Amino acid sequence: MRDILVVLGVCLAAIIVGACLFFYGPSLFREKVTSEEAGSQTEPVDIAIRVLDTGTNALEAPKRKNFAVYDADEFKKLWENAHDSDGTPLPKIDFDTEYVIGVFAGTKSSGGHAITIEKITESEGVRTVYITMTKPAAGCVTSQALTSPYEIVAVPFSGASLMPNETTIETPC
């Protein structure tokens, strides 16, 4: 008789534990993250952008490419990608407090193309660079000259990794 009561007690306890897990799920037993902690982990922060140069004829950048430059020598090479030796003066950059990002669209067969860095955000150690490339819609009248759009910006220094987020927009005629 005593064995039957023990077995019934164990069965009843198992049913109660099973019902709790069914209705409340295993999350009841996990560590909960407060809403303040969750918000600080996922809310991206906008990063200040200082546009150094933008144009449509990067003389030495025939292919689509993004650059991040952390020193003066590399910055000079990046600047030459856009200007070659046309005499455009190199802007002053304090590489102790900022670095440079350059985006180049590559050579295009007509006018009407552009590339811009719309914004940069940082979240959880990653800086996302939002790049927009625009092109003319089919049938638009554009110049038939070769173009090579680019933009070069300076941003506050950070050890965060960079991730591009690229969008292409077709502009109507």
Image: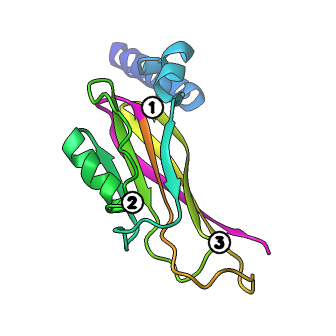
Circle 2: residue type? Ala
Q: Nearer the viewer, residue 52 or 2?
A: 52
For the question of whether residue 43 can be seen, the reply is yes
Q: In terms of sequence position, does the residue under pointer 3 or pointer 2 come before the other?
A: 2
Callout 2 crowding tier (Cα within 10 Å): few <14, some 14–19, many ≥20: many
Q: Which quarter of the picture shows residue 137?
A: bottom right
The residue that disc 1 covers is: 123
The residue that disc 2 covers is: 82
Circle 1: residue type? Ser
- Residue 144 x/y as whole percent: 61, 85
Mark 2 lies on a secondary structure that is helix
Q: Nearer the viewer, residue 87 or 107?
A: 87
Q: Nearer the viewer, residue 92 or 5?
A: 92
> Which quadrant of the figure contains the N terminus?
top left
- Residue 52 x/y as whole percent: 47, 42
Q: What is the span of residues highlighted in magenta in the rendered image?
A: 155-173
| For residue 47, side relative to residue 69 (left or right) | right
Mark 3 lies on a secondary structure that is loop
Q: Nearer the viewer, residue 83 or 30?
A: 83
Identity of the residue drawn at 39% across and 20% down = 10
Q: Is residue 54 above or below residue 94?
A: below
Q: In terms of sequence position, does the residue under pointer 1 or pointer 3 come before the other?
A: 3
Callout 3 crowding tier (Cα within 10 Å): few <14, some 14–19, many ≥20: many
Q: Is residue 14 above or below residue 120?
A: above
The residue that disc 3 covers is: 112
